[in-house]
Image (spheres, rainbow, N blue to C red):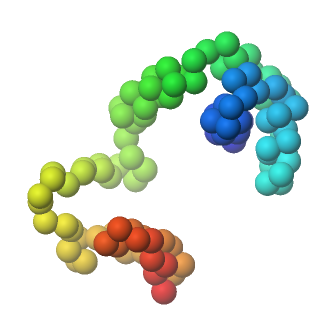
Amino acid sequence: MHYIASFLLDALVGNSSPSTKDIKKILDSVGIEVDDDRLNKVISELNEKNIEDVITQGVGKLASVPAAGGSVTVSAAPGSAAPTASSSPRRSKGEERLEEGRVQRVR
């Protein structure tokens, strides 16, 4: 995932054809060791493809993947009540949550 995310990040800032060197620079900046074989595979698969099309296809594929722990994520319908505190998953210390349009850190 690191390789794909770095490729997409570089493409997002305007580099339509990120190279191995570009991706390594991004990963090195955050301390991630690079496996050259895997990186070359990602680059060969993604180069010369329309990034927006790749993202659209990926979103479609992710829709069929079950959520972690077997739980199902369901969006609330517009106008429906927000979940109550008792129905919210328990958060660990330091975890962020979105409340009333702003991010808050749980203490």
Residue 4 in sight from this viewpoint: no
Q: Which residue is located at x 63 percent, y 35 percent?
A: 12
Q: Which residue is located at x 43 percent, y 31 percent?
A: 59
Residue 107 against residue 48 in the figure, above or below: below
Left or right: 8 as drawn, with respect to 99: right
Residue 83 against residue 64 in the figure, above or below: below
Write down the quadrant of residue 100 in the picture.
bottom left
Left or right: 55 as drawn, with respect to 20: left
Q: Residue furthest top?
A: 48
Q: Position of residue 47 (x, y in %)?
A: 70, 17
Q: Which residue is located at x 45 percent, y 23 percent?
A: 57
Q: Position of residue 99 (x, y in %)?
A: 34, 72
Left or right: 28 as drawn, with respect to 2: right
Q: Position of residue 83 (x, y in %)?
A: 21, 68
Q: Position of residue 96 (x, y in %)?
A: 48, 71
Residue 24 in sight from this viewpoint: yes
Please name whichever residue, 67 or 50, is drawn nearer the observer in this view of the structure: 50
Residue 25 against residue 58 in the figure, above or below: below
Q: Residue furthest bottom?
A: 107
